[in-house]
Amino acid sequence: MTFENALLTALSAVTTALVYVCRLMWVKQEQCEKDRYELREEIEEMKSLHGVATGTLNAVRRCPVPGCMFRDPPLNPPTEKGIPA
């Protein structure tokens, strides 16, 4: 085997390895993109629900009724059977 043949063989092996790694990365990238699109709707829904929950909590905490049980919750809420958490 001549020096040129050895270089061509080595170049072929490196190219094959690079193509294999690129193919693996391409498949993984497609999976990630698919997952991202599937989860995007769920994330948007969670953001919306978080906004509603935060707004509701702020409204309850600002209750203008004197002695409202929701406005100033106790620092140590009662626990089951009187045992602190």
Image (cartoon, helix red, strand yellow):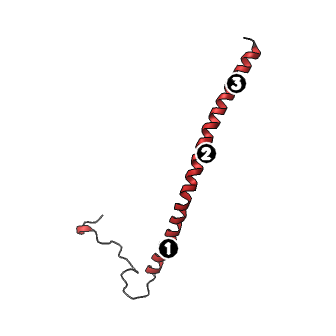
Image quadrant in which the C terminus is located: bottom left
Q: Residue at the location (53% across, 69% down)? A: 48
Which residue is tagged 3?
Answer: 12
Q: CA distance from mark 1 to mark 3?
A: 59 Å
Please name the amino acid that badge 2 sits on: Gln
Q: Is residue 59 above or below residue 36?
A: below
Which one is closest to the eye, mark 1 or mark 3? 3
> Which percent across, then down, holds residue 69?
36, 81
Q: Is residue 37 above or below residue 68?
A: above
Q: Is residue 50 above or below residue 10?
A: below
> Which percent across, then down, holds residue 66?
39, 88
Please name the amino acid that badge 1 sits on: Val
Q: Residue at the location (60% across, 37% down)? A: 24
Looking at the rendered structure, the secondary structure element under dot 3 is helix
| Residue furthest to the right | 4
Q: Residue at the location (65% across, 37% down)? A: 22
Image quadrant in which the N terminus is located: top right
Q: Earlier in the sequence, mark 2 or mark 1?
A: 2
> Which percent across, then down, holds residue 10?
69, 21
Q: Is residue 54 above or below residue 16?
A: below
Which residue is tagged 2?
Answer: 29
Please name the amino acid that badge 3 sits on: Ser
The 10 Å Cα crowd at callout 1, few under 14, some 14 to 19, many 20 or more, is few
User: Which image quadrant is residue 44 in?
Assistant: bottom right
Which residue is tagged 1?
Answer: 52
